[in-house]
Image (cartoon, helix red, strand yellow):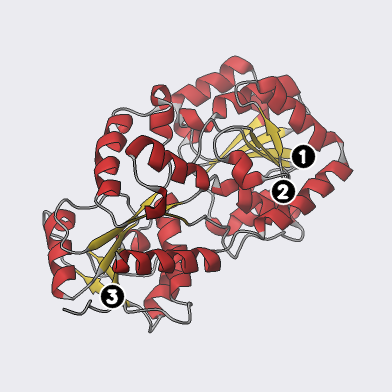
Amino acid sequence: MPTPPLHIGIEARYLFSREKTGIENYTTELVRHLARLPELPPLTLYTDATPEPVDAGSAEILASPRLRVRVVPRRRPWLRFWLPLVARQERVTVMHFPGTIVPTWLPLRAVVTVYDLATLHDPARALGNEARVVNTVVRRSVRRSARVLAISQTTARDVTTFFGVPPERIQVTPLAPGEQFRPVPDAAAEVTRRFGLHPPYLLFVGTPYPRKNLHGVLEAMALLGRAATLAIAGRKAWVDPAVRETVRALGVADRVRFLGDVPDDAMPALYSAAHALLHPAFHEGFGLTLVEAMACGTPVITANTSVMPEVAGTAALLVDPTRPEQIAAAARRFLDDTALRAEYARRGRERAGQFSWERTAALTLEAYRAAHRS
């Protein structure tokens, strides 16, 4: 019997969510750029409610004549039964699960994206039962998938190390900065107008989760004295009582600004006007903020561990994330040395240019084709 032609399905509920996190942004950028590929097989996006555009990316997707959107009404168990059933009836041959969970019953080939396995590296910094969930649910998902998409070489190695997936079943599909991330003229005036921020300031973008190392950044600010303000962009940091207590205990309340959830259209200016991005995380799957900042010409300080050296290359100052004095010393270098800032801004723009969603979409399509042949 001849093999049916490739028909791609994507579990696409994330495309139309108003709460944009890493998975939502990844799915949006990937689908936008898949739709731009010259030789795209039939592709159906499966969601559980009538889709409405929530941003420019989802609007572009809904307007694309090359993509079909299929609503499978929300009924339990949606992911474990109704979605696979409808996909099979519609002759989908490869189904992509960006949310990392592959249903137990799936009568077609699966492709799954894995972002990071930080909780298995460092269970002590995991939230609640996160490590147990990753070790069971993600393990099952990758083992039943024909292809695994890893967002970095580091994550690819982890998938093999922790779950025993052969490297030949893993495709590295790096993340990339969005098209909006570029240097912004008069960025300082814009951030002053929108946020009341006055340079020099250092920038932290992310959540207060332990592995992000916001505590180490705050300790570095205490060591810096009054050399700069720290701007924290992230919707959860400002309401976290542990973060508030750390700020109070370190005596840096007058030098820390909690910006909350910053609109997407404000991020390029916020990056561009910063003297440096501080991202000394203990572990990441990729570290998208690194290349977003670099694309905007912002010098970057990041950790010398996990995926950060892979992503940053020679375009960032690398520090030991367990030593706040190193974070502070690197920040002081960028604050005091205009030529050094300019050099790392140049390096960063070059490095960010090596990552693109066009390439990631092409690599992803290769993985779909490989899964179809398997």
* Secondary structure at numbered mark 2: loop
Q: Label 1 is placed on what type of residue?
A: Pro
Give amino acid for label 2: Thr
Q: Is residue 204 visible?
A: no
Give coordinates of residue 286: x percent, y percent.
Answer: 52, 46
Instruction: Kindly report the distance in space between the C-alpha atoms of the residues bearing marks 2 and 1.
Output: 12 Å
Which residue is denoted by mark 2 in the rendering?
Answer: 298
SS of the residue at dot 3? loop
Q: Position of residue 64 (x, y in %)?
A: 40, 80
**Quick one: 250 or 195, which is closer to the camera?**
250
Q: Position of residue 161 (x, y in %)?
A: 40, 36
Q: Earlier in the sequence, mark 2 or mark 1?
A: 1
Q: Nearer the viewer, residue 82 or 164?
A: 164
Determine the residue positioned at 29% across, 34% down: 135
Q: Which residue is mark 1?
A: 200
In the visual, does 98 lie left or right of 285? left
Q: Residue furthest front?
A: 1
- Position of residue 206 relative to residue 288, above or below, is above
Quadrant (top left, top right, bottom left, bottom right) of the N terminus: bottom left
Q: Foreground residue, 188 or 353?
A: 353
Whether residue 117 is visible: yes
Q: SS class of the residue under badge 1?
A: loop
The quadrant holding residue 181 is: bottom right
| Picture quarter with the C terminus | bottom left
Q: Quadrant of residue 369?
A: bottom left
Q: Amino acid at mark 3?
A: His
Q: Is residue 267 left or right of residue 139?
A: right
Mark 2, Cα crowd under 10 Å, few <14 / some 14-19 / many 20+, is many
| Residue assigned mark 3 | 7
Q: Residue furthest bottom?
A: 65
